[in-house]
Image (cartoon, helix red, strand yellow):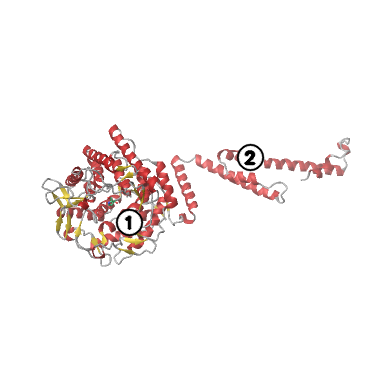
Amino acid sequence: MPVATLLPFTATPNRKSASPTSFRLTEKFILLLVFSAFITLCFGAIFFLPDSSKLLSGVFFHSSAVETNTRTGPDSSDSGSAGNDDRVLAKIRKDHEKALLEAKDTLQKRPDEIKQDIIIEKEKVVKESMGQGGKDVNNLPFVEYRRPPGATGHEPLDPETRDRRAKIKEMMKHAWDSYRRYAWGSNELRPVSKQGHSSNLFGSIKGATIVDALDTLYIMEMFEEFDAATDWVEKNLDFNVNAEVSVFEVNIRFVGGLLSAYYLSGKEVFRRKAVELGEKLLPAFKTPTGIPWALLNLKSGIGRNWPWASGGSSILAEYGTLHLEFMHLSKLSGNPEFAQKVMNIRKVLNRLDKPQGLYPNYLNPNSGQWGQHHVSVGGLGDSFYEYLLKAWLMSDKTDEEGKKMYYDALQAIETNLMRKSSGGLTYIAEWKGGLLEHKMGHLTCFAGGMIALGADGAPGDKTGHQMEQAAEIARTCHESYARTALKLGPEAFRFDGGVEAIATRQNEKYFILRPEVIETYMYMWRFTHDPKYREWGWEAVQALEQHCKVEGGYSGVRDVYAPTPNHDDVQQSFYLAETLKYLYLLFSDDDHLPFDHWVFNTEAHPLPVIKKDKTDRPNESRC
Ligand code: DMJ
């Protein structure tokens, strides 16, 4: 109300001298009016004062609504401000009363109920930030992330082991820093010529070393490096390329690497990228049988097989090494198609007759018939067997089909391929149409670790027997290293022509920083704690330092029997993903990535066991 309008009633010159009895009727009426206006004002003032509930809620809750309204409330010159004031005040009063009630409610709750409320509230916020229905831009359902146990470890108590473990971290740092300095963003590093290198296995997808190394960086607690790698993935990892890639290589290194990085760190970007890439690989399964092509153009979705593969066949170790990653892709995306595709591969295999119970390396995706009867636990076959066992373990031992296929296959391998040399070395030969080639590949050496990992579940009292087989294979593979000049193993070694565990062909004498022998040492150490496995691992470390380390990283060598190394100038991405990771774990305690919670894919990327107890299931998607 404007101040001037009050003046005639308060500042009249006669009022001071007039006695109450001498008031005229009109004066009395004016006085009454002034008095009632005063009462109304007082009442209004009481209404404007904060009440106790407002004060309380101001202490406990900092409501942004209150702050906003206070700061931006209408000023007194605004027409209609009185109506606004009423509405604002009513809202404030209502909000504060509600907050007070909630506070009272919360104080009466048990801590576990409060915790639950917080989780629900958090989920709501994430869902809201993802937009309608809890889906993000990639249409991914909401997943509540829970880190499985043992993602990082702790220092071993024994000082020598601690030092050796620290040495391996130092090796990782040299490999990573060199890649970062000379080849950042390329697939791999040329450590001698100090530049980037790209194999055609990845088409024009870039950054294989970055994605392959992510989990090793995390496991070794190299978090500054992990963050730089994450940043690169966020900004640069691009699958929208018009290029043909190897479905197997892209799956084990990129999908596997991204999945592991997600499960270790909980960063959504890795889940999103893994699912995006998985979806791009799905057209590879468009064949009459559903057995995928080896090669796929990511843009056109057109697939084909390697031109050298028998009769246009797909390769056992390639189409048989998708299972672990694809099961996790279904779990994280809510899309059952990934799991269906890999389960169908098993169906096709189980319908076929197997010569002597063995799986030939070649299978035609059009006819669904075997190609050449060539069987190997090394190149072309290896990780198929590994994934049967690990599918069972990763399912928390519920995948009975995978279990049966693994132990039946292992029995057939033992009967038909496993032999002992006259010098007493157990080896796994290759089988060509019923004839044995007495050669064992470096790749085959992973079988020691696999057999040890499966020994515990072996049917018919075979646990001890399989542990012995595993130890024998580890010994043979160690011999293949010990019998060279550089103390590093050749690509393949033979047991014929008077030699044992030695490469006889020039094109089998190279060493490309492969992990399989060290992988087997790691498994054998975990299951036996026999110190010789750590000693053998340490021998390999010394040889790597002496012959493979160069100023610009680590390089493979062309001939392990030559007295001085001739470098091949490639630092393979699996050196960071597998070789250094398995070495680090060999010198770590068993609770770092414990086997009852984690399974390693064939590129050493750890994936969590999908626990059968629903309440303990990590990272389940909810559509
Ligand atoms: C890795 O890429 C994988 O281990 C694959 O299964 C075969 N071997 C190479 C490393 O040697």
The kind of secondary structure element at disc 1 is helix
Q: Which residue is mark 1?
A: 201
Q: Quadrant of residue 433?
A: bottom left
Q: Quadrant of residue 518?
A: top left
- Give the number of marks: 2
Q: Amino acid at mark 2?
A: Asp
Q: Residue at x 10, y 47 (%)?
A: 422
Question: Mark 2 and mark 1: span between their CA atoms?
Answer: 72 Å
Tell me, for residue 51, which label it has, or none: 2
Image spot of residue 154 (x, y percent): 34, 37
Relative horizontal placement of residue 23, taking residue 404 as reference (left or right): right
105 versus 305 height, above or below: above
Relative horizontal placement of residue 92, taking residue 298 as reference (left or right): right
Q: Amino acid at mark 1?
A: Leu
The kind of secondary structure element at disc 2 is loop
Image spot of residue 44 (x, y percent): 71, 43
Image spot of residue 490 (x, y percent): 22, 48
Q: Nearer the viewer, residue 587 or 77?
A: 587
Q: Which is nearer the N-term, disc 2 or disc 1?
A: 2
- Mark 2 or mark 1, whichever is nearer to me: 1
171 versus 435 height, above or below: above
609 versus 305 height, above or below: above
Asked if the residue at tag 1 contacts the one at tag 2, i.e. Cβ–Cβ closer than 8 Å, the answer is no
